[in-house]
Amino acid sequence: EKGTYDHYMLKEIDEQPGVLRKIIEAYSTEEGTLDIAPMIKQAFKQADRLYIIAAGTSYHASLIGKEYFEKLAGLPVEVHISSEFGYNIPLLSKNPLFLFITQSGETADSRQVLVKIKALGYPSITMTNVPGSTLSREADHTLLLYAGPEIAVASTKAYTAQLAVLAITAHAIGGGAQMIDLKKELALTANAIQTLTDMKEEIAKIARELLTDKRNAFFIGRALDYYVSLEGALKLKEISYIQAEGFAGGELKHGTIALIEEGTPVIALATQPSVSPNIRSNVKEVLARGAHACIISMEGNSETDDRLILPYVHPLLTPLVAVIPLQLLSYYESLHRGCDVDKPRNLAKSVTVE
Ligand code: F6R
């Protein structure tokens, strides 16, 4: 039910703090820590490499998941687009484990990979929002997202849920170089998301300043921010039909900067302390070519001209917060253009053809 909302998408954006709190609860143990089922942990411990298979927004979440597994669990990861992997299986490690990330659990491109790797005898886990879905039934194990039904075609709360469950899983396996009090940091992240969903008017204003009458837009970032910029661009394309590209900040100058002209919108994410000076210098490069830049940074790592400063969260968890203004920018621009927010043209909620 939409209740007082005009669109499911906005309702689902607003549900994100609650979803995150529900995930924390669902994965909490009696001892008050976060954990996953022992059998799933065992499957991870036996693997020498994790292969994450996904499509669309779930693929974008997977790229961030790779960082979590490598940093928190010391497990090497490859991330693959399901429609590519299935028809061109790369050289695999000795003991691979396959993780399928799929909100719906019905995506045909991902399922065909599952069918193939099962035939090869490899172990599999599906991370999904839908218990009893095809990929959940067919994989050896399931990790649930607890995001509640997602009705709007453009995925929002399932993405942040995927990031949270990926962090919890990687943290539960443990043994990586980085340590984090994940339960505490995720709770703070839920509050930070709440703060942003309460800033709708400001974000709607940014959408009007930046995107009104624009044909194209660029999202740039480095490290984790790069992956979030891919998701920001996809959201804008899907629901407002603006041609958008997510780009690694440092890669722009190797060609794509040729597209920057007077007034081209460039949304730069600068939440990562380790690459903050680098992304800021990329912003200077596009400003010098006439771009209209909008820097989104984070408390503790901001400068005076930044257009939006996100509440501070642990540097590994910034994607859960940085994506919120990007979801809202797309929503308000879609609304402003009179597009069908919840049911964009040419798209279906679950893609059951290959
Ligand atoms: C984007 C979107 C799609 C899906 C993709 C995979 O907003 O909804 O890109 O993420 O079709 O779907 P699932 O996660 O159900 O496998």
Image: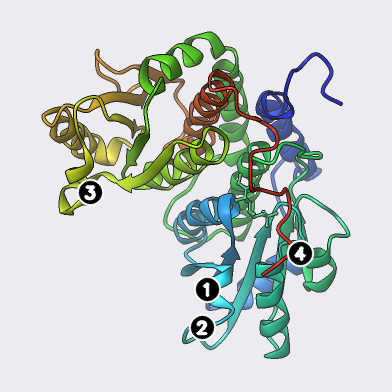
What's the residue type where badge 3 is placed? Thr
Instruction: Name the element at disc 2.
Output: loop
Query: Judging from the image, what secondary structure is the residue with disc 4 in?
Result: helix
Instruction: Indicate the secondary structure of the residue bearing disc 3.
Output: helix
Alpha carbons under labels 1 and 3: distance apart: 24 Å
Q: Note whether 294 is above or below 74 in the view shown.
A: above
Left or right of 124: which side holds 321? Answer: left
Q: Which quadrant would residue 343 be assigned to in this image?
A: top right
Distance between the alpha carbons at the discs numbered 1 and 4: 32 Å
Q: Residue at x 33, y 22 (%)?
A: 300
Q: Residue at x 61, y 61 (%)?
A: 173
Query: Residue at label 4?
Result: 38
The 10 Å Cα crowd at callout 4, few under 14, some 14 to 19, many 20 or more, is few
Of the numbered discs 4 and 3, the one sitting upstream in the chain is 4
Q: Picture coordinates of residue 312 (x, y %)?
A: 44, 24
Give the left or right position of residue 279, taking residue 346 as reference.
left
Callout 1 amino acid: Glu
**Residue 323 rendering spot, x and y as whole percentages:** 51, 34
Q: Position of residue 324 (x, y in %)?
A: 54, 29
Q: Which residue is mark 1?
A: 84
- Which residue position holds label 3? 256
Q: Quickly name the residue at label 2.
A: 88
Tell me which label, 1 or 3, sits earlier in the chain: 1
Label 3 near label 2: C-beta < 8 Å? no
State which mark lies toward you, 4 or 2: 2
Report if residue 309 is visible in the image: yes
